[in-house]
Amino acid sequence: MQLDINGRSYTVAAAPETALLWVLRNELNLTGTKYGCGEGECGACTVLLDGVARHACLTPAAEAKGKKITTIEGLAQGEKLHPLQQAFLQEGAWQCGYCTPGMILRAAALLRNTPHPSEEEIVAAMNGNICRCGTYPRIVAAIQRAAREA
Amino acid sequence: MPDEGLRPRVEAERYEMSSKTQRFELGRRDFFQWLAAGIVVAGVMPHVPTDAWAQRREGEPLPDNIGAWLHIGEDGAITVYTGKVEVGQGVRTSLAQQVAEELRVDLSQITMIMGDTRLTPFDMGTFGSMTTPVMGQRLRRVAAGAHDLLLKVAAERWGVPQSRLRAEAGQILDPGSRRKISYGELARGQRLAQAVAMDDPLRPATEWTIAGTSAAKTGGRAIVTGEHRYPYDWTRPGMLWGKVARPPAYGAQLLSADLEAARRLPGVTVVRDADLLGVAAPTAEAAAEALAALKPRWSPAPSQTSSSALYEFLLNHPAADASNTQGDEELNAALAAASHRLDSVYQVAYIQHVPLEPRAAVAEWQGNELTVWTGTQRPFGVRDQLMEAFHLRADQAHVLMPDMGGAYGGKHTGEAALEAARLARAAGKPVKVIWSREEEFTWAYFRPAGVIKVRAGIDNRGKLTAWQFDNYNSGEAGIETPYQVAHKQIRFHRTEMPLRQGSYRCLAATANHFARESAMDELAHAAALDPLEFRLRNLRDERLATVFRTGARAFGWPRRKQRPGQGFGFGGGVEKGGRIATFAEIRIEGGNVKLEHVVSAFECGAIVNPDNLKNQIEGAAIMGIGGALFEAIEFADGKIESNRLSRYRVPRFRDVPRIEVVLVDRKDLNPSGAGEAPIMGLAPAVANAIFDATGRRLRHMPLAPNGLEA
């Protein structure tokens, strides 16, 4: 099976029903996409399929075929960070950072459709992503900053 | 500087007790056998004479009691070695800031090697808010010693008195002759090792220029790009994937399993050894398939209690060594004479940490030497577990801790490390074991549930006269009251434990503060006193009083209700050297409790990194919302029913109020830890606000798991 990940084509051996999460992590060693719950409740595994946020833990690899898959590894352009990555750094919007890739990709999907979201829109869009360290207010501030500075 | 506050009973963190104190094995080697040339400065614990250390020649053994050390390389790079670990609390940065401060170098010159049992000195573990007050002090002294040594080396080189020289930006300067030399140059060709005593004076916080600032957390780029490798992400060449068969309920015993069916699968190793039934296979999918092929049969689980009968169980099942529950005659007399009395029972549910990264380990054997990469707050404790399990010497077991995805007291133990090591030994290849969320929920451990009985009395001037506080099973942390009272009896009663219990951020201080600060609110209302005025009248800890007043000012206490359903409350206390006061505004809407606004005032001595401290206090308040309002582990018949995130609610974006943090910076006091204490004010603040809004006194944590039921 061929997968288009971060602008690169990968041939993968996994069975088509294998969750995209495990294909990325275990077969391709793209470990920025995290496991947190396996049931789409925490958002740690969020990736973009053609720009739309999806739970990689619930997405069979076959479903991603023919789509442009974006993981956290593909967001920066070379040395230049994505505005959201930059904003997370500036707002200090993490503690352990385990939820951060999923948060950034979920936020990227939001800003793609709603470039200047209100606080309520941010909360509604992000509510499916869990940060156990409790950095939510900083994540909201980071998304607002990225929207402002984009 | 003494802490004038309470001297609370120290509750040993659970699970570190079994750990043997394995002294630092590197002490018998020489630094320069494994470090490049340069300068090493080590901090020696006060009871070891430093001259014994200083007089040794290269190649001679080092004394054992070393707390931390640092190395200055020929390129000027400074590497600091500490057994503490980074779990998101930010100590990789805040410890480096303190070293940079004393050593007068830029933060970027410092690399922290943390929690590697072969390279760092022995450390009990990262818990109890000890990193800042203990390791921070040690590293500052080591760095101050290095600073002095560099001055001395430069003075000798130039033949000038040391007093003429000063250090600045990684260089030694001689203002008289305008000469300067970098630390790297001074270290060049050196194999110089120096010990410093742990009681040398330090740079006062009032003069700090690097410590005391909001330096950005190091390693941020790797976090936002996904490059950082957590334990769950770790791999080794030729690695297999391990999986362990779990019983369907606590206490169920393995009756049989089809080991041969699993063994017939390609590349699969099956282990059935005492309590372990597991497999290792070339891919995660193959491991899952092999596990399924085992078709294990289990005995029925023994009869055991459930969450619905939990509090009765705790009260009726004292542990064998339980303390007495007799009343105290004088206390009873004081209660009888009180103008207002309180007799309340509080309950606290089992909850779990739910670190977003579950347990994970990769184990690799080379002959009889074992290396394990795993997520733990106690790398040396896990090493001891491995040594015991495999009869290894300390130099044969090596544990490394890549910065991990959250812990909150929940990762003191080495389950995944042991499983991976046992499977790897059988398979003859490295093995990775990662726990699923369901495994984490069932087979890790829980914050203890508890019942707390409070009887108290006050006189007609609003002074506490009697205080009886009996805690069943929660624990002793924060059990002492900061309020002055003539007659008191404060006791912790051990009980049988329905579930496996362990440490949790702030331990039992959250439960004890929930009960105490709710009781104080009840007493204030009974006496028709403002709850703040009542507390201040009875408080003897001036630092806590300041924090209460500071929080009250920022929140605007006392506030008048503007609309129905609105309520205000607060709670606070002293724990692990930190003083917290949390004020909450809530709104009840359709039976749901919504937090609108939280103000947390906090004081922990001199502040090392204000923004990181704020981040910790905000995070603690948010984590506290879960335990306060809705988190509870449901269990029955030996099964955890809330074993997934869809069945166990943790705080999300929508649950978060506007949070204001007010820091009280006491530069005249040594810094205390701050990762824990800020969590404990939230629950009583919310309970007291619910009373303010509704007149209903809720005495059970979580307060409203299904909203406020009519």
Image: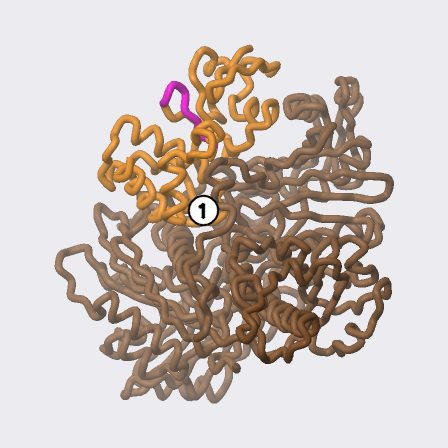
Above or below, comparing residue A134 to residue B225 in the picture: below
Q: Secondary structure at mark 1?
A: loop
Q: Position of residue A108 (x, y in %)?
A: 35, 31
Picture residue at 40% right of the left edge, 62% below the top: B610
Q: Position of residue B620 (x, y in %)?
A: 42, 56
Q: Quadrant of residue B685?
A: bottom left
Q: Chain A drawn in what color? A: orange
Picture residue at 54% right of the left edge, 65% below the top: B104
Q: Position of residue B361 (x, y in %)?
A: 66, 40
Picture residue at 19% right of the left edge, 55% below the top: B565
Q: Position of residue B350 (x, y in %)?
A: 50, 53
Q: Which residue is mark 1?
A: A132
| Chain under numbered label 1 | A
Above or below, comparing residue B676 to residue A97 in the picture: below
Magenta residues, start to end = A45-51
In the rendered structure, the answer to whether residue A100 lies left or right of residue B441 reads left
Can residue B418 be seen at all in this image of the molecule? yes
Q: Chain B drawn in what color? A: brown
Residue A50: say if magenta.
Answer: yes
Report the residue that reaches farthest toward the front: B177
Q: Quadrant of residue B128?
A: bottom right
Above or below, comparing residue B309 to residue B245 in the picture: below
